[in-house]
Amino acid sequence: MIDFPIMTLAMSTAYIGVSILTIIAVGISAAAFFRPPEAILESMAEVDVKESWLPMLGTLKAAGVLGLLIGIGVPMPSIGTAAAVGLVVYFVGATIAHIRVGDYSVSGQHMFLLLAVATLVLDLIS
């Protein structure tokens, strides 16, 4: 396979940019799960997620954010890849939880899933 330095640089830059967007978005979401506003509590109740689960779910999101930070901050790309995979799995699960109760609307978990998938794809091709 021929390696084009400009393409490699462009993909690396895109990966870092999308990773930073994912880190910010999921990080804010994770923090919200530790002191959830009423909107989050209502959304979780609609999909039968107990309020007592929120700190654990927030911790899983925060672990994904930390893994992405490590993946772009130090030369350990496999940690970033694992974190991106974990976030994809997490948000696929969130989407399934919404579908299970008949909620087919496009909402926050879809945006987070899209960011996590984009981060993973860019990580794998850069």
Image (tube, rainbow, N blue to C red):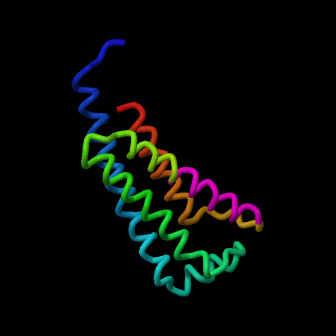
Q: Quadrant of residue 100?
A: bottom right
Specify whether 116 is left or right of 98: left
x then y, percent, for residue 75: 26, 40
Q: Which residues are magenta?
A: 87-100
Q: Is residue 7 above or below residue 69?
A: above
Residue drawn at 47 percent across, 51 percent down: 116
Specify whether 15 is left or right of 41: left
Q: Is residue 91 magenta?
A: yes
Residue drawn at 28 percent across, 27 percent down: 7
Q: Residue furthest top?
A: 1
Q: Give the quarter of the figure containing the N terminus.
A: top left
Specify whether 21 is left or right of 116: left
x then y, percent, for residue 81: 43, 42
Q: Nearer the viewer, residue 68 or 42?
A: 68
Q: Is residue 94 magenta?
A: yes
Which secondary structure is most common in the magenta stretch? Answer: helix
Q: Residue furthest bottom?
A: 38
Q: Is residue 57 above or below residue 40?
A: above
Q: Is residue 81 above or below residue 64?
A: above
Q: Nearer the viewer, residue 110 or 30?
A: 30
Specify whether 71 is left or right of 29: left
Q: How many marks?
A: 0
Residue drawn at 35 percent across, 50 percent down: 19
Q: Quadrant of residue 97?
A: bottom right
x then y, percent, for residue 126: 34, 32
Residue drawn at 52 percent across, 76 percent down: 55
x then y, percent, for residue 78: 39, 40
